Image (tube, grey):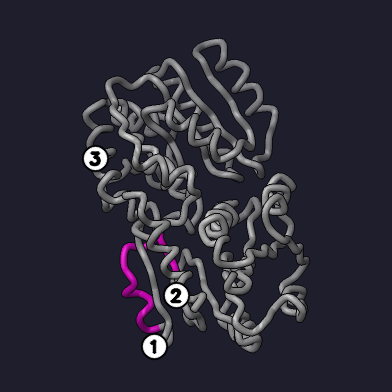
Amino acid sequence: MSGKLIFRVNGNNEIGLGHLYRCLALAELVKSKFECIFVTEAIPESLVLQITDSYRYFKVHEENDFLLYDDLLEKGDVIILDGYKFDYYYQIRLRSFEVKLVIIDDFVALNYSADVIINHGISNSCGYNSVINDLCKVYTGFEHVILRKVFLEQTFIHKTIESINTLFICMGGADPFQLTQKALNSALKSRQFRRIIVVTGAAFNFNSTFRDLISKSCLEIEVSHYHNISDSIMAKLMGQAQIAICPSSTISLEACCIRMGLLTGYGIDNQRAIHNQLIERECAISVGDLNDITEDKLIHAIKKLSRVDVVRKLISNQKEIFDGLSSKRNFEIFSELAI
């Protein structure tokens, strides 16, 4: 072991659960080199159980609680920050413990005091040039995508699309704007599928409208609803579908590894960078702002995607970009930090 790797990460209905999932993916990757420890604010109990099954875990109520853990923070430890509360001054305070600092980023901030920044959402590091010190290393793009092992392994499995009959819908771990309902309604009205697989995450807020929609839709075609499932079951279900509707968050990157025709958009600001990169690299078809798009426009986009030639072209691009080797590249980053 090369010391402790402490994940200070948040996840909730407002910012989603992707921060937690990618930290769990990193922990799985480097646990042979580091003792991995998680520190979070309140998160869904199912994720607490998932973390504590393999790692030490501490819950904090405010940021100062973490900084008061004198017996936890030691010289030479590696701290990973993944969330939106950890500004430059917070980073400076952590630096006083003589730790190494890694930031998993979604936006380019005004200033950093980090050893390493990983931002797989943007395609290049130019935006960081004026806000980092000379010793900070920045890694960007899907070449450094942080995903759980079960999804990266799927990149090495050959998948051929002969027909399109099954749709996969997942709007992430929280879906605070009830986009799942809009996507399912549109898919049903498009009449393009024999089966629709719907997955909701641990922080999803059920309501009677959603429950009624699931019940009624099952009378028309086969609609399968799964809630808060494991990553292995998620990968298996995604593999049964030819196309997917997902926001431009972690779930869309997992879909690219599974090799699917992907219809995507952004529901919150932190999804815009991944969205732009997916569209620029022609791995998906965009519907823009998921909150604003009408059902009619979404139906039109679904019909456009429900063509074998279109899906095959997207998958061909996904194969070039999501090569399954990002975990190897990321492991090398942390191996250097362990020296």
- Estimate the x, y position of residue 117 in percent, counting from the top left: 45, 72
For the question of whether residue 228 can be seen, the reply is yes
- In the displayed structure, does residue 199 sit left or right of residue 330? right
The reply to whether dot 2 and dot 3 touch (C-beta < 8 Å) is: no
Q: Which type of secondary structure does the marked residue at label 3 adopt?
A: helix
Please name the residue shown 54% across and 37% down the image.
Answer: 232
Direction front: furthest residue: 1
Q: Is residue 125 magenta?
A: yes
Q: Please name the residue that numbered disc 3 is placed on.
A: 316
Between discs 2 and 3, the one toward the N terminus? 3
Vertical comparison of 89 with 55: above or below: below
- In the displayed structure, does residue 86 sit left or right of residue 106? right
Residues at marks 2 and 1, CA–CA distance in whole angstroms: 17 Å
Q: Which span is picked out in magenta?
A: 118-130
Number of the label disc, if any, that sits on residue 134? 1
The reply to whether dot 3 and dot 1 touch (C-beta < 8 Å) is: no
The amino acid marked with disc number 3 is: Ser
Q: Please name the residue that numbered disc 2 is placed on.
A: 336
